[in-house]
Structure formats: C-alpha cells, structure tokens
Image: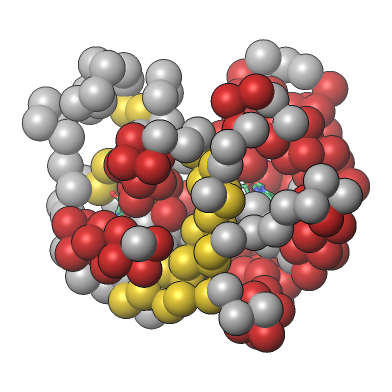
Amino acid sequence: MRIILLGAPGAGKGTQAATLHEHLNAPHIATGDLFRAALSQGTPLGLEAKSYMDRGELVPDDVTVRMLLERISQPDAADGYILDGFPRSLAQAEALDEALKSHNETVDKVLLVDVSEDELVRRLSGRWICRACQTPYHAVSNPPKTEGMCDADGGELYQRDDDKPETVRNRLGVYRDQTAPLIDYYTAQEILTSINGEQEIDVVRADLLAAIN
Ligand code: ADP
Ligand code: ADP
C-alpha cells in the first residue's frame, strides 16, 4: 500500500508512522529525516537543504522530488511505503502522481492528521528526537522512560533547531500556504480521510488503522 500521512508540523506524523510501518510492514519514508541524514553526512544535498530548513522554508521542489523518487525506487519500497512530510506542495503531489502513473501505480490513501495551531505550537516546543532513529518524544505528553534517552535504541535525544518559536511560526505559515491546498487535491481524488489528531496517541493510531483497513 502507498500511504501519505498529511498534516502540519507537529501533528504527530512521525509518531504514528513509527508504529504504522511495523503494522503494515512497509518502510517509513520521511523527507525531513532524509534531509537531516544528508546534512549530518555533509553531502551537497544536505548543505543545500540546510539554509531552507533553518528558515523553516520548503527545500525547492526539484531537489526534493528527485530525492524522494530515488528513495521509493529502492527494493524495500517495491510493495509500498508510508510517506511522512511529502508531498508538501501541489507541484510535489503532481510529480509523485506522474511518476507513479508511469508504473501503472497510484497513491492508495491519504490520511490527514488534523490538529489545531495552538496544540501544534505546544507539541513542537516540547519535542525531543532521537539522534539515531529519529523517534519523536514529548517532554510532557510522550516522555521517554529515561530522560534524554530513546526507549527504542538508547540514542541521545535532542531538540531540533527549527523547533524554536520563530521558525515554528514560519513553518506553520508555509504549511497553510503551500501544503494545505493538498487537502482539496486529494479530496478530489476521493482518497483522503481526515483523522482527529488531538486525541491520545493510541486513539489516533486506532483511527488511522481503521481508515487504512
Ligand atoms: P516536521 O516533521 O516538523 O513537519 P520535517 O522533518 O518533515 O518537519 O521537515 C523539516 C524541514 O525539512 C522542513 O521545514 C523543510 O525545510 C524540509 N522538508 C522536509 N520535507 C520537505 C518537502 N517535502 N519539501 C520541501 N521541504 C521539505
Ligand atoms: P510531525 O512528524 O507531524 O511533525 P511528531 O510525530 O514529531 O509530529 O510529533 C510532534 C510532537 O508531538 C512530539 O513531541 C510528539 O511526541 C508529540 N505528539 C505526537 N502525537 C501526539 C498526541 N496524539 N498527543 C500529544 N502529543 C503528541
């Protein structure tokens, strides 16, 4: 199955994808994680992406689409995947549809994780991420068992630079202007289901699974 998790920064896409991908036995592909990995390896792609990420802007579509199409062409993605953080613009959505069409494939489901702006700001300001596996935690609503340490692999937890309040405001504006139009795009294709993301993590997960099955 080819699934897109759509939602604003902080909606809980990464949190949900981490368990959904085990359930569906499909890779979790997050373009933000791919950019951060490229940056930590110091590749030209990572360095190009950095200036946009630091400002909370979108990395240009051509670079992002190329990276994503390369990733979904890997053998582990042959039977499907869960996309998190892609597409983020109409041009990206159209490029994905176009590329899938050339293989007689389509996106199966788009799951919109819907969360109010006040709650997004609260979540991002308390977010901690594992340096090794990228699993997100929250200082208050989803703390790790041991402070500063990832439950899954013991990795060090850190706060992303782009989760500081000025950048968060910019990212939420970018979401409204450039990404939210995808709701209409996928509604018109009749593949979008909206989930209330402002519930306990387990309840959101159950709703997502119900929408998928
Ligand atoms: P979040 O999970 O908080 O929404 P991400 O990790 O998905 O954040 O993205 C972090 C940053 O990486 C974005 O602000 C943007 O600069 C860049 N980025 C990630 N995915 C995309 C994309 N599909 N198109 C353009 N830029 C992207
Ligand atoms: P996204 O990938 O959409 O940017 P994350 O999965 O990183 O969002 O979640 C953002 C923050 O909100 C993290 O700190 C995470 O622990 C927390 N979070 C995720 N889902 C919930 C939820 N249902 N209730 C409360 N906090 C949540």
**From this viewpoint, is residue 27 visible?**
yes
Would you say 169 lies left or right of 61 here? left
Choose top left, top right, bottom left or bottom right for residue 57. bottom right
**Which residue sits at x=57%, y=42%?**
80
Q: Taking 53 as reference, is 192 above or below it? A: below
Q: Nearer the viewer, residue 77 or 54?
A: 77
Choose top left, top right, bottom left or bottom right for residue 25. top left
**Which residue sits at x=67%, y=45%?**
53
Q: Nearer the viewer, residue 20 or 178?
A: 20
Choose top left, top right, bottom left or bottom right for residue 135. top left
Percent x, y of residue 118: 36, 76
Percent x, y of residue 174: 67, 68
In this view, which residue lies farthest toward the front?
Answer: 104
**From this viewpoint, is residue 92 visible?**
no
Q: Taking 75 as reference, is 58 above or below it? A: below
Would you say 40 lies left or right of 45 here? left
Q: Quadrant of ligand 2?
A: bottom left
